[in-house]
Image (tube, rainbow, N blue to C red):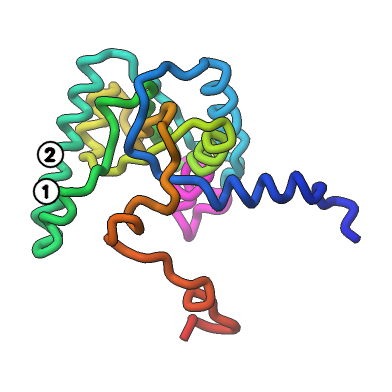
Amino acid sequence: MNDHAYSEAEKAAIYRVIRERRDMRHFLPDSVDPDVIRRMLEAAHDAPSVGYMQPWRFVCIRDPSLREAMARLVDDERQATAQALDERGQAFLELKVEGIRECPELWVVALCEAREQYVFGRRTLNEMDLASASCAIQNLWLAGRAEGIGVGWVSLFDPEALKSLINAPEGAWPIAILCMGHVEAFYSAPMLEEKGWDQRRSLAALMGIDGWPE
């Protein structure tokens, strides 16, 4: 028996929210309770970070013109991505890859400026700032699913252009546009799996013992 383990019901809830988290693209227009958003952001801020650097910064988008500029930025990258995908380009364009114009809550997550001062844990793995911020986004995602709020991570944008739109300081780096809101239903499986874009690999195929997976 492990005295530090949660109850069976608590464990089941944790594994359920992990299993049912979805990258959402379809949203209802209903506003989200500010207390719910605050709890989701607090969950994000409770994330681990290498060297305790806490590199995440959250920017709430309220200006409709700014939202539209961000949507156009994503549209531009969507077209560029389709071209880069060659024969899969048209199939990609048929996917709904964001909900920027529909979601009631729109946020940008960025890495903070002056990250070079954080050496602890990053001397040989400079990308650990991104890994830390990704943990924060995952926390927010899981909290959102537990609250019944859909979250979609959009990464189709030019970071320099988005940085300019949100007036981020030199050295900061946007990594995510987060669309959040109520949904009619959560996808029964990841949307890209439902649409036949790809399939989840088996865990066994991704595991190795004392060396790289066979």
Q: Residue drawn at (14%, 61%), measured in percent from left and top?
A: 88
Number of residues whose C-alpha sits closer than 10 Å to that of mark 1, classed few (under 14), some (14–19) or many (20 or more): some
Front residue of 5 and 55: 5
Do the residues bearing badges 1 and 2 touch, measured as CB atoms within 8 Å? yes
Q: Residue 76 — which label?
A: 2
Horizontally, is 155 left or right of 116 in the view?
left
Disc 1, SS = helix
Quadrant position of the N terminus in the picture: bottom right
Q: Position of residue 172 (x, y in %)?
A: 36, 34
Total numbered labels placed on residues in the image:
2
What type is the residue that disc 2 sits on? Asp
Vertical relation: 120 (above or below) 104 = below
The answer to whether residue 201 is magenta is no
Q: Residue 44 — which label?
A: none
Q: Is residue 175 visible?
A: no
Front residue of 79 and 131: 79
Q: Residue drawn at (44%, 34%), measured in percent from left and top?
A: 150
Front residue of 143 and 184: 184
What type is the residue that disc 1 sits on? Ala
Name of the residue lying farthest toward the bottom: 214
Q: Residue drawn at (25%, 26%), measured in percent from left and top?
A: 101
Number of residues whose C-alpha sits closer than 10 Å to that of mark 2, classed few (under 14), some (14–19) or many (20 or more): some
The answer to whether residue 123 is magenta is yes
Q: Position of residue 104 (x, y in %)?
A: 36, 21
**What's the distance in space between the residues labelled 1 and 2, CA to CA?**
6 Å
Q: Is residue 123 visible?
A: yes
Vertical relation: 75 (above or below) 7 = above
Disc 2, SS = helix
Q: Residue 80 — which label?
A: 1
The quarter holding residue 45 reads top right
Give, as a single range, the part of the protein colored magenta: 117-135
Q: Position of residue 63 (x, y in %)?
A: 28, 13
